[in-house]
Image (cartoon, coloured by chain):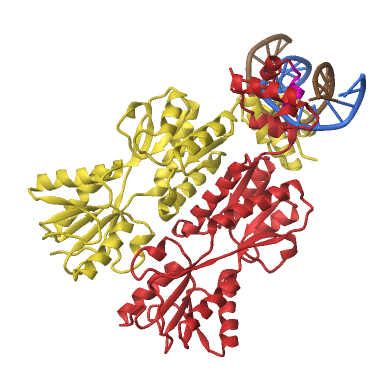
Chain colours: A yellow, B red, C brown, D blue
DNA sequence: CTGAAAGCGCTTACAG
DNA sequence: CTGAAAGCGCTTACAG
């Protein structure tokens, strides 16, 4: 019932191996033969059998996307968005996307291992970059092709990474507020760990120094003590809208009294007023570049492990104003 | 280098076919032999080759998850959450999850077709239920196993569906507000199409009639005219927090002046105050049941196509209060 | 309860 | 430029 390469071969009057070569556009095959084969394929409605191809060639034609082992993935639009972008680019390369997700590190690791050992995927895109990650260690040690979306300090030479320049973003956040005339700034975060926090905050600090201004770090909690700051850089959109509400409860109005700038340009940024001035991190591009890099790695496993930096863009909206 | 069934057979001192049967726990194999085989597998670190298994058995051991062809999937936490739940349940069944997503219906359809024709997946879970959907028609016509998360009116007999009882939810929303003493209610929506809207609204209307109260439908727009209503049923959380802000701009305070109840219990419900009274739709369960039903369908393709209704739960928080 | 053999649908040296 | 053959790692009637 299913049309195989043999059926095509018969109709085209050639050998099955010739059909195979024609399908892969081998330069060993004449154009005339390729034409015949293509015609036969169309006529029969041929479709390759991925399993047979994988078995014979050793290539799965599929990649795995690894989600972080955290509970609240669904709260961050980032993941769905990049998954969509990854799938979009994968399709263009005739590649299928499978997923790996789990609550614990162990669960995730065993899932990744199984996917690879069963030869279901050729490589992985890892969507998080925490320190000391079992999955990443495993991938490096076993020399499995992967790219990471985000940044790592350790073993950077052995890792292909795709990321934004978070430090520059932190720096530009400070610059922008300064350019509006704000002199007293604060950086607000609900965490003091994670590469993203460190880089954005460091960029902020360095810029403040070079501007000769002083910027404080404020840990987000119920009562927010921003001192005399009139410009706030907030770690991400979701925290920003919580901060704005808390300030409002304390009688401080955004942007009338205080300007707020944040990061990610997620759905939260345009949910309620004031709409947030925020950095768009270009998730689509992050996704596309990840698969391009992985595809490259699959073809040239021993090539250098580069880091790709995707540009960001400031979206000025309602939460900032000149002093 | 890779350990195959043959290596295991040799070490266990049996034939490869015996190993295969032992792996699948065939009742034709003695316990003693199974033990030997298991021991050999462990010793060698055997892992099945999914491609070979698929090719030989005709089963891919993978399912496809089909996302709706809309741009703003990432804004709705629902999708990431159910994807995680689906993958969790799939893992328990030794099944891999691949994804299909696209901007247009055509793109999505071609993707689904390719995945199936290349035998990459055995069936699908479709995460949307719009009317007149090409993907669904294709799946039905070609008798491809699938389950849909959501509801359809047409061809319901031919479709295995997993859904909440949205009508009952709409009804209970009205009941709850009525139980708090609210007499004038309104249902607020930003759309007048879609099964979810229809069912929730219909439940609302029917309950209002049976209570002898009158409920209006209010289309959400910039200026919100809720008349004398003191109880608002809002189509979903994200709309609810927009509505609350708009009311606040109009000098109406929630819950002091007006109570608001909504649906989904997403991240938006506990983002800012007042935290929303909302229905938890039990997404995890929706995901788990979907794969269970699909797995069943894969084994018994000609079985009846049932509809599974997953219970919901009202989460009372800050946006509602007694009159 | 177990083995030997054929076959699933491809790819890829090898030979010409 | 093309064909014949072997092989990828499994499953599954068939036979005993």
Quadrant of the frame with the N terminus of chain B? top right
x and y, in percent, of residue A317 in the image: 27, 63
Decide whether residue A117 is among the magenta residues.
no
- Classify B89 as above or below C13: below
Task: Work out whether residue A269 or residue B39 is closer to the camera in this orientation and state it.
Answer: B39
Q: Residue furthest front?
A: B32
The residue that appears at 33% across and 29% down in the rendered structure is A156
The residue that appears at 34% across and 35% down in the rendered structure is A131
Task: Work out whether residue B111 or residue A101 is closer to the camera in this orientation and state it.
Answer: A101
Q: Is residue B41 left or right of residue A158?
A: right
Q: How many marks?
A: 0
Q: Is residue A264 left or right of residue B82?
A: left
x and y, in percent, of residue A94 in the image: 57, 39
Decide whether residue B15 is among the magenta residues.
yes
The residue that appears at 36% across and 61% down in the rendered structure is A268
Quadrant assignment, res A27: top right
x and y, in percent, of residue B304 in the image: 77, 58
- Classify B142 as above or below B258: above
Task: Work out whether residue B188 or residue B85 is closer to the camera in this orientation and state it.
Answer: B85
x and y, in percent, of residue B273 in the image: 33, 69
Please report the bounds of the magenta region as a residue range: B14-20
Quadrant of the frame with the C terminus of chain B? bottom left
Dominant secondary structure (helix, strand or loop) of the stretch shown in magenta: helix
- Classify B268 as above or below B181: above
- Classify B191 as above or below B300: below
Q: Is residue A274 left or right of residue B193?
A: left
Residue A274 visible in image: yes
Q: Residue furthest left?
A: A212
Residue B218 visible in image: no
């Amino acid at each position: 019932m299913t049309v195989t390469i043999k059926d095509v071969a018969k109709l085209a009057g050639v050998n099955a191996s010739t059909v195979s070569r024609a399908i892969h556009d081998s330069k060993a095959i004449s154009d005339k033969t390729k034409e015949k084969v293509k015609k036969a394929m169309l006529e029969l409605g041929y479709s390759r059998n991925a399993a047979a191809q994988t078995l014979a060639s050793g290539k799965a034609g599929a990649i795995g996307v690894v989600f972080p082992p955290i509970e609240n993935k669904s709260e961050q639009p980032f993941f769905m968005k990049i998954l969509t972008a990854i799938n979009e680019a994968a399709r263009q390369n005739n590649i299928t996307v499978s997923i790996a997700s789990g609550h614990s590190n162990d669960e995730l690791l065993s899932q990744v291992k199984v996917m690879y050992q069963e030869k279901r995927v050729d490589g992985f895109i890892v969507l998080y970059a925490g320190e000391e990650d079992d999955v990443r260690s495993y991938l490096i040690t076993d020399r499995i092709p992967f790219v990471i979306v985000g940044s790592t300090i350790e073993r950077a030479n052995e890792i292909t990474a795709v990321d934004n320049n978070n430090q520059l973003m932190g720096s530009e956040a400070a610059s922008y507020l300064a350019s509006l005339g704000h002199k007293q700034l604060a950086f607000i975060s609900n965490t003091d760990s994670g590469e993203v926090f460190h880089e954005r905050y460091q960029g902020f600090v360095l810029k403040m120094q070079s501007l000769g201004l002083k910027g404080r770090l404020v840990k987000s909690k119920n009562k927010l003590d921003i001192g005399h700051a009139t410009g706030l850089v907030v770690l991400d959109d979701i925290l920003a809208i919580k901060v704005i509400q808390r300030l409002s409860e304390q009688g401080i109005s955004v942007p009338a009294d205080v300007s707020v700038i944040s990061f990610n340009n997620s759905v939260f940024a345009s949910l309620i007023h004031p709409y947030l001035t925020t950095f768009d991190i270009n998730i689509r591009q992050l996704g596309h570049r990840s698969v391009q890099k992985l595809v490259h790695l699959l073809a040239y496993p021993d090539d250098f492990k580069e880091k790709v930096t995707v540009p960001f863009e400031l979206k000025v909206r309602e939460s900032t104003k000149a002093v």
